[in-house]
Amino acid sequence: MALPKLILSDIDGVWTDGGMFYSEDGDELKKFNTSDSAGVLWCRILKIPVGIITGEDTQIVARRAKKLGIEEVHLGVKDKVACVEQLLSKYQCNWNDVAYIGDDINDIKILEKVGTAYSVNSAPDYVKARVSNCTIKNGGEGAFREFVEDILKGEGELERVVELYLQGEHLNQ
C-alpha cells in the first residue's frame, strides 16, 4: 500500500457528533472537535489534499474548512459518488487512491468504492459492516484525526510527519 492521494470526509457525524443547535433567531450551530485540525495539518505537511463532501449546505462548514485551509469543500451534495468522480479527474487518481471516512447510509456507496474506507465508531452497524476500518472514537470526538493518524501509522509515516512538524514544517502551511 501507499499513502492515499486524496483524503475525503463527510462532516456531520464525523467531525461533529451529528447534533445541531438552533438559536432563538433560527441560527444553526455545530460543535467541532479541534483535535481534528491536526489530521488536516498532517495531510497538508505531506501534500495530501483533503476534501469535505456533505449533503448539508451550511456556511458553518465552509467557515471551518476555510480556517483549516481545506480547499475541496462540497456542500449540499446530492450525489456524493459523482462528486468524488469529479475529484478523481481533477487530482488524476482512481478510487483505490482515495481514503474516505463516513458515518451513515449516504456514505455507503463511496465507502464501497474507495481504497481505504473508514467509519466512525458511532456509525450504525449496517455502515460499519461495509468497511474494514472503524475508528475507536465516535463522531465529534476527534475521529477524523484518528482516521488520518491510523492511515499514517499503517504506512509508517506518522513519526515522519511528527518530526516534520517539530522541525517547523507546519509553519510553511
Image (cartoon, grey):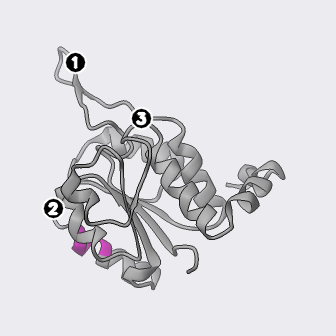
Q: Dot 1 lies on which element? A: loop
Q: Are marks 3 and 1 in contact (CB under 8 Å)?
A: no
Q: Is residue 77 visible?
A: no
Report the residue marked by disc 1.
Answer: 23
Determine the residue positioned at 56% across, 80% down: 1
Q: Quadrant of the C terminus?
A: bottom right
What kind of residue is marked 1?
Ser
Which segment is the magenta one? 80-84
Report the residue marked by disc 2.
Answer: 78
Residue 13, image x, y percentages: 30, 44
What kind of residue is marked 3?
Phe
108 over 114 or under it: above or below: above
159 within the magenta span: no
Please identify, in this view, whether the residue under mark 3 or under mark 1 is nearer the observer.
Answer: 3
Residue 15, image x, y percentages: 39, 43
Quadrant of residue 63 within the rendered picture:
top left
78 over 69 or under it: above or below: below
Q: Are marks 2 and 1 in contact (CB under 8 Å)?
A: no
Q: Earlier in the sequence, mark 2 or mark 3?
A: 3
15 over 99 or under it: above or below: above
Work out how far the residue at label 2 is from the one at label 3, CA to CA, in angstroms: 23 Å
Q: Dot 2 lies on which element? A: loop
Determine the residue positioned at 37% across, 66% down: 132
Q: Dot 3 lies on which element? A: loop
